[in-house]
Amino acid sequence: MESKSQPIGVPSESVKKLFDALSALPRLTHCQKCGTELLHVDATFFSCGGEKVWNLPLPFCSNCNREEDAAYAAA
């Protein structure tokens, strides 16, 4: 079954504060679950009016993701 995401209304000032806070966090280097060194995927986010842009590295654990993929395939 395919799920469709629906936009939610969040005040733009709250979104700006969130992304400013996320941008200030130190980059994670190791998975908090298994300790594997994390890979990072660069993601760009834009404010609703396009006046602000955030580039954030999204952490990705190749070990945990492999386990999740195997669990999903077995289900």
Image (tube, grey):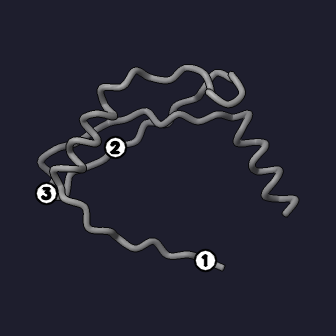
Q: Outermost residue, right direction?
A: 74
Mark found first going from the N terminus, 1 or 2: 1
Pointer 1 local density, CA inside 10 Å: few below 14, some 14–19, many at least 20: few
* Amino acid type, mark 1: Glu
- The answer to whether residue 29 is left or right of residue 44 is right
Estimate the x, y position of residue 8 in percent, counting from the top left.
Answer: 32, 68
Q: Is residue 15 above or below residue 22?
A: below
Rendering quarter of residue 73: bottom right
Viewer-nearest residue: 22 or 65: 22
Mark found first going from the N terminus, 1 or 3: 1
In the picture of the structure, the residue carrying the numbered disc 2 is 44
* Amino acid type, mark 2: Thr
* Amino acid type, mark 3: Gly
Q: Which mark is residue 49?
A: 3
Q: Which mark is residue 39?
A: none
Pointer 2 local density, CA inside 10 Å: few below 14, some 14–19, many at least 20: few
Mark found first going from the N terminus, 3 or 2: 2
Is there a contact, CB below 8 Å, between mark 1 and mark 3? no
Estimate the spatial distance between the alpha carbons at disc 1 and disc 2, rounded to whole Å: 25 Å
Estimate the x, y position of residue 20 in percent, counting from the top left.
Answer: 24, 35
- The answer to whether residue 67 is left or right of residue 14 is right
Q: How many marks?
A: 3
> Which residue is at 62% across, 27% downward?
32
Is there a contact, CB below 8 Å, between mark 3 and mark 2? no
Pointer 3 local density, CA inside 10 Å: few below 14, some 14–19, many at least 20: few
Badge 2 element: strand
> Which residue is at 34% across, 34% downward?
22
Viewer-nearest residue: 73 or 31: 31
In the picture of the structure, the residue carrying the numbered disc 1 is 2
